[in-house]
Amino acid sequence: MAPGGAKKNILERLDAGEVVLGDGGYVFELEKRGYVKAGPWTPEAASEHPEAVRQLHREFLRAGADILQTFTFYASDDKLENRGNVQSFTGKQINEAACDLAREVADEGDALVAGGVSQTPSYLSCKSEAEVKAIFMKQIEVYVQRKVDFLIAEYFEHVEEAEWAVQVLKTTGKPVAVTLCIGPEGDLNGVSPGDCAVRLVQAGADIVGVNCHFDPVTAVKTVKMMMEGVGKAGLKAHYMVQPLAYHTPDCNCQGFIDLPEFPFALEPRVLTRWDMQKYARDAYDSGIRYIGGCCGFQPYHTRALAEELAAERGFLPAASEKHGSWGSGLEMHTKPWVRARARRDYWEKLPPASGRPHCASMSTPAGWGVTKGDAQLMQKKESTTQDELKVLFGKTH
Amino acid sequence: MAPGGAKKNILERLDAGEVVLGDGGYVFELEKRGYVKAGPWTPEAASEHPEAVRQLHREFLRAGADILQTFTFYASDDKLENRGNVQSFTGKQINEAACDLAREVADEGDALVAGGVSQTPSYLSCKSEAEVKAIFMKQIEVYVQRKVDFLIAEYFEHVEEAEWAVQVLKTTGKPVAVTLCIGPEGDLNGVSPGDCAVRLVQAGADIVGVNCHFDPVTAVKTVKMMMEGVGKAGLKAHYMVQPLAYHTPDCNCQGFIDLPEFPFALEPRVLTRWDMQKYARDAYDSGIRYIGGCCGFQPYHTRALAEELAAERGFLPAASEKHGSWGSGLEMHTKPWVRARARRDYWEKLPPASGRPHCASMSTPAGWGVTKGDAQLMQKKESTTQDELKVLFGKTH
Amino acid sequence: MAPGGAKKNILERLDAGEVVLGDGGYVFELEKRGYVKAGPWTPEAASEHPEAVRQLHREFLRAGADILQTFTFYASDDKLENRGNVQSFTGKQINEAACDLAREVADEGDALVAGGVSQTPSYLSCKSEAEVKAIFMKQIEVYVQRKVDFLIAEYFEHVEEAEWAVQVLKTTGKPVAVTLCIGPEGDLNGVSPGDCAVRLVQAGADIVGVNCHFDPVTAVKTVKMMMEGVGKAGLKAHYMVQPLAYHTPDCNCQGFIDLPEFPFALEPRVLTRWDMQKYARDAYDSGIRYIGGCCGFQPYHTRALAEELAAERGFLPAASEKHGSWGSGLEMHTKPWVRARARRDYWEKLPPASGRPHCASMSTPAGWGVTKGDAQLMQKKESTTQDELKVLFGKTH
Amino acid sequence: MAPGGAKKNILERLDAGEVVLGDGGYVFELEKRGYVKAGPWTPEAASEHPEAVRQLHREFLRAGADILQTFTFYASDDKLENRGNVQSFTGKQINEAACDLAREVADEGDALVAGGVSQTPSYLSCKSEAEVKAIFMKQIEVYVQRKVDFLIAEYFEHVEEAEWAVQVLKTTGKPVAVTLCIGPEGDLNGVSPGDCAVRLVQAGADIVGVNCHFDPVTAVKTVKMMMEGVGKAGLKAHYMVQPLAYHTPDCNCQGFIDLPEFPFALEPRVLTRWDMQKYARDAYDSGIRYIGGCCGFQPYHTRALAEELAAERGFLPAASEKHGSWGSGLEMHTKPWVRARARRDYWEKLPPASGRPHCASMSTPAGWGVTKGDAQLMQKKESTTQDELKVLFGKTH
C-alpha cells in the first residue's frame, strides 16, 4: 500500500465526487466488547488495551471505511477528569496512542486518519470562549504533531460551541469537518439546521453535517435541510452524515439520549444490513458523499454501505469475501427453506419481528429539555451521590 | 496464571458445585466482524485471520468465560468441502490453528479449552454410522494431539447422531459434554428431551444439555425436561445450557432457522444485558451449573451472566472494570435524566421499544418440517443453482 | 312467519345436522349503548328501557341468529340485590319482561327463545346445594310460565355448580344446554374440559360447550377437548360454542377477566368480521353445530358467521342486504383504491394495525388465582369501600 | 321538556360560552347494526328501518348529545343514484324521514336538530358551480320545510366545494356550520387549514372546523391551525371538531380512507372511553366549544365526552346512570382484582394491548393521491366491473 503521504486527501476525494465512507461507532462497540465504560464513555482503552482498539479499526477498514477516526471521543482533559476512573494515563498519552493506532491500521489500506474533538463539559458549565478553545487546542496539538490527515469537530448540541471548535481547528491548515448531533428541530437553542450549517461554513468548515443522536432517516433529512440553508445563503460546502445504527422514530430534539432505553436496552432498535443499504442509497441520492456511522454501528453495518455503493465506488470491500450480496451466501445453507432466502426481494421486503410481544414499538422520550447553563449540567468530578440520585429518580415517570 | 495442566478440570469444577460459564457465539459474532460467511458458516478464519479469532476469545475470557471452545464449528472435512470457498487450508490445519488460539488465550486466565464436533452433512445424507463416526474421529485426533481439556458434541438435531458422536468422543478418555439444538418438542424425530438425555447419558456423556436454536426461556425449560427424564431413569449427569441471544417465542420445533428473519434480520430480537441476568438466575435456580451462550452472544452478554452470578462465583470478571452493576456507571453521565437510570429498578422493569412501528412482534415460522433423509437435505458441494432456487422461492409464502 | 309452536325445536335442528347460530353479547353491547352498568352487569334494562333491548334482539335476528336468549344474565335475586342500584323492579318482573321481549322478536322470524341461568354469588360464597338450586328454580319458574323454547345454563367457572343448574333445568322437561366459561386448563378447580363435559352430560345436559372468557381460537380448542372426553366415555351430546369477540392469546385460566384491559380498554382486541368468518369455519370443521357469541359480539359479527356458513345453511341473513360478501360492496366506493379492496384475497390476508405504537401486543394477566370460598369472593350487597379498595390497589402491580 | 321552539339556538349557546356536544357516527354504527351498506354508505334506512335510526338517535341523546344530526349523509340525489340498490324511496322521502326522526328524539330532550349536506360526486366529476349548488339546494329545501334548527355542511375534501355549500346554506337565514375532512396538511389541493377557515368564514359560516378522516389528536391540531388563521385574518368564528373514534397516527393527507384497514379492519384502532376523555379535555383546552364525533363513535364514546366535561356543563348525561365515573362501577364487580381497577389512576395510565402479536402497530397508507377531476373519480351509476377492478388490484401492493 502507498504510504500515508501519497494518498489523496479528503478534499481531493470529495471534490472529485468520490464516495467517502466513514467508520463506525467505537465507543458503543467497545463498550460491548468490554473496553469502554457506559456513563463516562472515555477512550482510555487506547492506552490500556490497544489490541482491542487496533482490531476494531481493522474490522472497519476491512468493511470498507475510507476514514479511520482516532479513538479520542471525550478525550479532552476536562472530560477525562470526570470519568471517575483511576487515571493511569494522561490525556496526552491517550490521544497519542489513539493517533498511532489509527495510523497503523489506516496504512494497511488506503484510508485516511481523522483526529477529532467533541462537545466539552466546560461549555455546558458556561466556561468562557477562551477556556473552551484552550481545551480544543490541547487535543489539536497532539493531532498536528502526530500528522493526522484532517480534523473532525463532532457531537455538538450547540452550534456556538461547534463554531469555536472549527475556528480552533482551522488554525492548523488541515481540512476541517464538523458535525452537530441535532435533528430537524435544530440545536438545543432552536437554531435551525440550515442556519447552523451556514454559521459553520462561515466559521471555516470544509465539510458539514450531523452525527449521532438520530437514526439514518432523520439524519439524512437534517443534512438536506443544511444543504438547503447553505445553498440559499449562496455558500458551498461538502456534506457528511454519521447517524446511529438505531431506529429512533420516537425521539424528540435531544435524540436517543432521551429514550428510556438509552443506553442499555437499545437492542431491539438496531438496524439490519438491509436497513443500512437503504440508508446508503438515500444519503447518496440526497447528494451526501461522506457517509458513515456512529453509535451502534458494527463492521457489518459499514460493509452494507460499501456493498450498496459498490458500483459507485468501483469495488467491494475486503470483508465482502465473507458476504454474498443480498444474502446470496445462503445458497450454501443446509436447509432448503433458508436457501430460498438467497435473494434481494426477500430481504428488502421483510419487516422483522421483535420477538417481544410485551413491548411496544415506540417509547415516550424523557424530555427534560435542559441545556447549557442548567444547574444540573454543571461539570463535576464526582459521581452523583445517592441523595442527588433520589431527587432524579423522583423526576422520572 | 497457572499453566493449563494445573487447572481444575471441568468435572472437578462441576462436582464441586461451581458455576462454570461458557463463552459465546463465535460464528455469528465473527460474521458481523467480517470473518465468517453466513450460509456455509465455516471457521477457516482460524487460519486466515487468527488475530480476529484471538481477540474474540480474549473478550469472552475478560467477560468471565471459564471455557473457551475451539473455533471449529462445522470444521469437519465433509462440511468444509461444501463451503464453496477456495480452500487455502486443509481441515486439519484449521482445527489445529483453532486449538492453538484457544489454548493461547485460555492460558492468559484460568479457563479450560473444549474441542467440539457438531452435526454432519453426512448424517443428513443418510451415510452409515461408520462413515459418520469416521468424520468425528478425524477432528478428535487433532483435539487429542493438541491436548484440549475436554470435548463437546454440540448442535445435533437428531439424538441418534449425537449418541454416535458421544461414543467416538468417549474413546479419548476425556470428559464429554453433549448438547442438542432442540426445544421442548424434542428432536426432529420427536424423541422427547427427557428420552434424548437418557440416551446420551447411557452413551457415556458426563454433561448433557441444549445449545443454539432457541431463546434462554425455552432452552432452560428444555434442560429441565432433560433433568426430569434422567432423574426418573435413575441416572445422574451434569447439565449445561447454551441458548441463543435472540428472543424466539414464535419458534416451532426447528428453532430460529425457521424464522423468516434468520439469519439477516434478527437484530430486533437481541437480548439486553438485563434479559441475560434474568436468564443466568433462571438457569442457576433450575440447577444448571454450566451456563453459556450460542449465536447472538456478544462479550457483554457473557459479562452479564458473570455479574448476575458474581456472589455465587465469588468474583467479578475482568471486563466489569468497565461496567457498573445494574447501570451504576451512569452516575457519571452528563445528562441528569440519564443519571436517574443508574439503578436496578429502572432497568429490570423497562420493556424496551423496537422503534419499528411497521413491524409485528411475532413471526410465522417457515415450518417445512423436513429432516434427515429428505432429498432436499442431501449433501452437495455446489451452490444451489438459480433454477433450483426458483423452485424454493415458489414454496415460501 | 310460523307461530312459535310450529318451529322445529332446538334438538330437532341439531339432530338433523343443521347449523344453529346463537346471538351475541347483550350485556357488553348494551353497556356501550348506555343501558347496562359495568361492574354489576345486571339486566334491569329489560324493564327500564325495553325499546333498547328489543332493538338489539331485532338486530341479532336480522344478522342471522336462530336463537334469541332472554336478556336475563345475572338476573337471579341474589345478584340483583348486589347491583347497588335503586330497585324499581323485582327480579321476577325483569325476568318476565325479558321473556316477553325475546318472544316478540323471535316470532318476527324463525328463531327460538332460550331462557338462561348463570353462576351465582351464592355458590361463590359457599352456600349449600339446596340454597343455590333454589336460586335457579326461582328463575326457571318464570321461563316455564312464559314458555321459552329451551334452557341454557351458562357462564359457570366451576363444573359442580353447572351440574346443579342442569339438574334443576332438567326438571322442566325442556331441552337443556350448558356452557362453562373455561379454557383448555379446565375449571377453576382444575377439572379438565373433557371431565367437565362428561359430568354435565351425565347430569342430563343435551348440549354442552363453553361461552365467554376466551377468544374463538381458545374456545373451539376447549370444546374439542370436551368432545374427546365425551367420546372416550362412550357418551353422546350436541356441542355449542359462544366465545368472546376479543382476541385473548395472553389469557391465563380465568380468561379475559384477568387481563388488565378488562372491561374498559378491550377495544384493540375486537375481532374483525373476517376473523369471525375464520372462527365460523373452524367451529364448523370441528363438528360444532351450535355456534354463537358472547361479550363483544355486535350484530355484524353474527352476520359474518351467517355469511361464512351461508352455503351450509342454505340462505343469507336479512342484514346481508346491507353487506356484500367479502367486501364486494366496496365496488361502489368513491375512491378507486378502496374499490380495489372489494375482494376476499385482500381482507383474508390483511394483518390490521392497531394505530397504537406505544402499546404492546400482549398483556400480563393479573392472575390472583382465587376461587370459590376465598374470603374476597363472599357475597356482599354493598360497594367495596375506599379502605377495602386501597388494600386491593396495593396488590395490583 | 320544552318544545323545540323554546330551546336556545346553537349560536346563543356558543355565544354564551357553553359546551355543545355533537352526536356520533351514524353511518358506521348503523353499518355494524345491519342497516347501512359500506361502499355506497347511503342513508335509505331512514325510510326502510326507522326504528333502528330512532334508537341510535335516542342513545346519543341519552349519552349527552346536544345536537342530533339528521341521518342524511350522502343523501343527495346524485349520490343516491350511485348506490346500486333498488330505490324504493326517493331522495326527498329519505331526507324528510330523517328530519322527522331527528326532531322526534331531539324533543325528548333539549337537543337541537341539524340538517346536513356533504361532498358530492358531481363536484368530483367537475360539474359546474351551478350544478353542484343545485344539488345542495334540493336537500336544503327539505330542511327548511321540516324546520331543522341549523345547518351543517360537512365532509368536504376541497374548500372550494365547501364554500359553495356555505353560500347555498346561508340563503336560508339559519345558522351555518361547516367542517372539512382535512388534516394539518390542508385540503386535497394543499390549501392550508388556516386559509381554508378564512375562506369559509368569509363565505358566511358561523362555525368552522373539521370532521371525519383523522383521529382526535390530529383533528384538534387542525382546528387550532384554523383558529390561528382566522385570528391572523382579523376575523371571528365559532369552532367545532368531530373526529373519528379511530387512532390514525399513520395517515397521510387523505386520512383513514387510505389506510389498508379501511373500512373493514379498523377494530384495533377504536378509542377507549379514556382516550375520549383525553380528547374532550384537549379540545376544550384548545378553545373549541362544539365537540362531537364521526365514524366509529358509539354512544359510550359520546358519554365519555359528557363525563369529562360534566363540571363545565353542570350535569351528567342520562346514560351515566349506567356508568361510574372513571370505572367506579367496578366497585361492585365479583372479582376483587377487578374491583381494584375502580379508579382513575388505573385507567388513565393503562396502555391497552392489542392481543394481536402478528400485527404491526402502524400501516402504510395507500397514497394514490388522486383528487377532483381524476378520471377514476368520475361519477358512475354502475358498480366497478371485474375487469376494471383487476386494473385496480394490480395497483395495490
Image: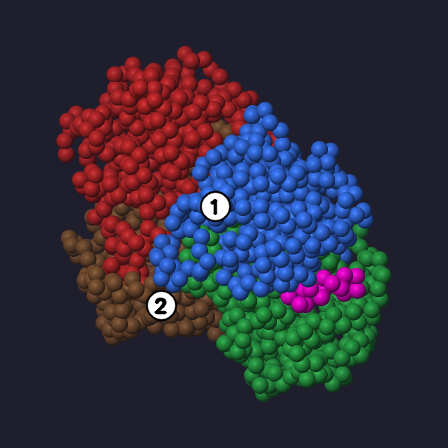
Chain colours: A brown, B red, C blue, D green
Q: Which residue is mark 1?
A: C123
Disc 1 secondary structure class: helix
Q: Nearer the viewer, residue D381 or C99?
A: C99
Name the residue type under label 1.
Tyr
Neighbours of disc 1 within 10 Å: few (<14), some (14-19), many (20+): many
**The quarter of the displayed image where residue D218 is located:** bottom right
Evaluate whether residue B371 shows in this view: yes
Neighbours of disc 2 within 10 Å: few (<14), some (14-19), many (20+): few
Asked if residue D44 lies in the magenta stretch, the reply is yes
Q: In the displayed structure, would residue D280 be above or below residue C213?
A: below
The residue shown at (79%, 61%) is D48
Name the residue type under label 2.
Trp
Residue B130 % position (x, y)? 41, 12
Q: In the displayed structure, would residue C220 be above or below residue A249?
A: above
The residue shown at (58%, 86%) is D16
The residue shown at (40%, 36%) is B218
The residue shown at (20%, 62%) is A385
Q: Which residue is mark 2?
A: A368
Q: Nearer the viewer, mark 1 or mark 2?
A: 1
Disc 2 secondary structure class: loop
Asked if residue D93 lies in the magenta stretch, the reply is no
Q: Give the magenta range.
A: D42-59
* Residue at mark 1: chain: C
Q: Quadrant of the C terminus of chain B?
A: top right
Q: Is residue D105 left or right of residue D15?
A: right
